[in-house]
Image (tube, helix red, strand yellow):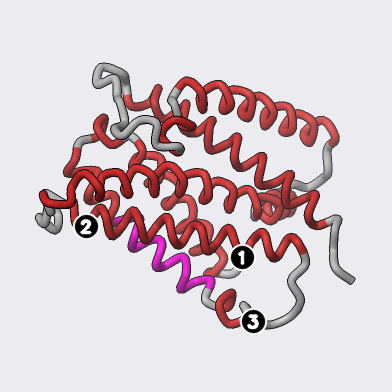
Amino acid sequence: MKPKQILKIITDVFMTAVLLLLMAYSLIGEAAHEWLGVGIFLLFVLHHILNIKWYGNLFRGKYPPIRVFGTVLTVLVLLSMAGSMISGILLSRYVFRLDVHRFSAALRTVHMLSAYWGFMFMSLHLGLHWGGIMGMARKLTKKPSKFRTWTLRGMAALVAAYGAYAFVKRDFGNYMLLRYHFVFFDLEEPVWLFLIDYIAVMGLFVCAGYYLAAVLRKNKVK
């Protein structure tokens, strides 16, 4: 594996880990949340530098359904990240120390919507590329195994099923549709329990992105 490919994987792993911690806003503290926000922004920039060729090929070639889906998803990730970053900087009390009181209510709404929709878009984006990740994993194994394949599929199904439960339990839909204007946390809950639920929700969207991409790849434009 080439060094650039290894760096891409490391960058994406850290981005995923930081994204999950950012969702635990009140459980990790405001200061930590802001510094992690700066961290994911830097990782996001590095991710796009490492994938700069994507922009060069944006207006080249045909656009079958799978490419349309990937392009739209990337744009939505960019928009949600921009919403999170801009609103986060303006609300900052520790890193940038702006905290624009006059527009704080509107900015908090933008920040919450960007965070929850962005979480879904990034998870779907990860699912879109999950086939490539599995392909690299297969190269590391000596022999194919039906037992291993079906075991992994079963585990994915269990994660997705629990993710659907956690989606409802954690009021994801209500936050995404702005039925609640504040995120409610149980401050006595251990962070690891919170993260398990959010990892499961991420797994649900990863599975959705993976299988949606599989369906779209079958509908190629000749």
Marks 3/1: CA distance?
11 Å
Question: Which of the two labelled residues, at mark 2 and mark 3, occupies the earlier sequence position?
Answer: 3
Residues at marks 1 and 2 touching, judged by CB atoms closer than 8 Å: no
Q: Which stretch is magenta?
A: 39-51
Residue 45 belongs to magenta span: yes
Q: Residue tagged by mark 1?
A: 71
Judged by its main secondary structure, the magenta piece is: helix
Three-letter amino acid code of the residue under disc 1: Thr
Q: Which mark, by number, is residue 59?
A: 3
Query: Against 103, is 187 above or below?
Result: above
Of all residues, the one furthest to the right in this rendering is 222
Secondary structure of residue under mark 3: loop
Q: Residue tagged by mark 2?
A: 89
Q: Residue at x 85, y 55 (%)?
A: 218
Question: Which of the two labelled residues, at mark 3 and mark 1, occupies the earlier sequence position?
Answer: 3
Q: Is 125 on the left-hand or right-hand side of 30?
A: right
Q: Position of residue 192 (x, y in %)?
A: 38, 26
Query: Against 33, is 186 above or below?
Result: above
The reply to whether residue 94 is in sight is no
Q: Position of residue 75 (x, y in %)?
A: 52, 63
Residue 211 location, quadrant = top right
Residues at marks 2 and 3 touching, judged by CB atoms closer than 8 Å: no
Residue 194 location, quadrant = top left
